[in-house]
Image (cartoon, rainbow, N blue to C red):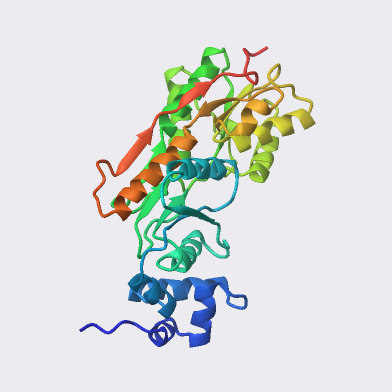
Amino acid sequence: MTTRPTIHDVARVAGVSVATVSKAMNGRYGVAAETVDRVMTVVAELGYASSLVASSMRSRTTGVIGVLVADFEPFSAEILKGVGAALHDSSYDVLAYSGSRQGNGEGWERRSLSRLSGTLIDGVIMVTPTVVNVAAEVPIVLIDPHTGRADLPTVESDSLGGARNATRYLAELGHRRIGFVGGRPDLKSSRFRDTGYREALGAAGIPFDADLVRVGFYSGDAARDAARSLLVQKHPPTAVFAANDLSAIALIEVATELGIRVPEDLSVVGFDDVPEASRLTPALTTVRQPMHQIGHTAAEMLTTLMSGQSLAKTHVLLPTRLIARATTAPPR
């Protein structure tokens, strides 16, 4: 009979004290991020489960589904609405969790999964995870993942096609200097949107110009810096496709500060169609991805797995659609 690993085994392999292991697993202060990452790596490798986890795994299910997000921003909020709608008439509750992002993404996600898995939740949906080679005692479904384990179920929207349509639309309006504010380079969606932008330029006979490309990391603050750098050039773009709506909104704010009118002087297209997009003045032209449907689909896939059934499809790609509003016009 195989002996279950103990906290002493984790401490020995990680080269730390038992107290440090306990603090790391429970997210307490006083432990360096790199030490927490090392401890959680050993926990995953040894398959260690604390007495609380082991007790929970021997008992009945919790009836709770966890949704692990990096930040509570508009995209995640809309995904959560879709998850909630899918589970509205079920017996499951939803626990949204955003753990401390000290250290690298892999350590953050391992710590978060270790805290949730087997004690609080019966399954987990991970939204835009940076790493997927994580261990958990419960089923996992990924939304817009980093590249990694192909065996984990995923749900995402057609970022490549959406980016092509956004860039093609700007080209059809007559723009030739079309800029791009990219997203997080570690995510598939960001790379697909970059590829779609470049492919649409090529199809329109517009040469790619690296001076018209910046990285906004899907973050409003980073996108503001990217926008300013893009717009203060001697020859700025007349139109910009931003990889998400937060970046597009930041771009419009910076343009306004610089005295650049939208859409008279600058056309802007975003991606997502978060609720704020239609409320802007002018309203944002954007690529709509079905965020509620993404969350709904991920929840349905997860409950299927939790019931012990197999999935008909393990990788689901949902369509996107360009929504033309008031931030785009032909160039002057």
Work out whether residue 70 can be spotted.
yes
Looking at the rendering, in which quadrant would you find the C terminus? top right
38, above or below 238, in the image: below
- Relative to residue 320, is residue 257 drawn left or right? right
- Relative to residue 162, is residue 173 drawn left or right? right
**Closer to us: 6 or 306:** 306
Residue 174 x/y as whole percent: 57, 12
211, above or below 60, in the image: above
| Total numbered circles | 0
Residue 173, quarter of the rendered image: top right
Residue 218 x/y as whole percent: 57, 42
84, above or below 201, in the image: below
Looking at the rendering, in which quadrant would you find the N terminus? bottom left
Identified at 79% across, 32% down, the residue is 257
**Closer to us: 197 or 329:** 329
**Closer to us: 87 or 13:** 87
- Relative to residue 233, is residue 274 drawn left or right? left
**Closer to us: 86 or 40:** 86
Residue 194 x/y as whole percent: 48, 35
Residue farthest along the left direction in this orientation = 1
Residue 41 x/y as whole percent: 41, 71
Work out whether residue 232 can be spotted.
no
Residue 64, quarter of the rendered image: bottom left
Identified at 48% across, 68% down, the residue is 115
Identified at 48% across, 70% down, the residue is 37
Residue 158, quarter of the rendered image: top left
Identified at 43% across, 40% down, the residue is 296
- Relative to residue 132, is residue 226 drawn left or right? right
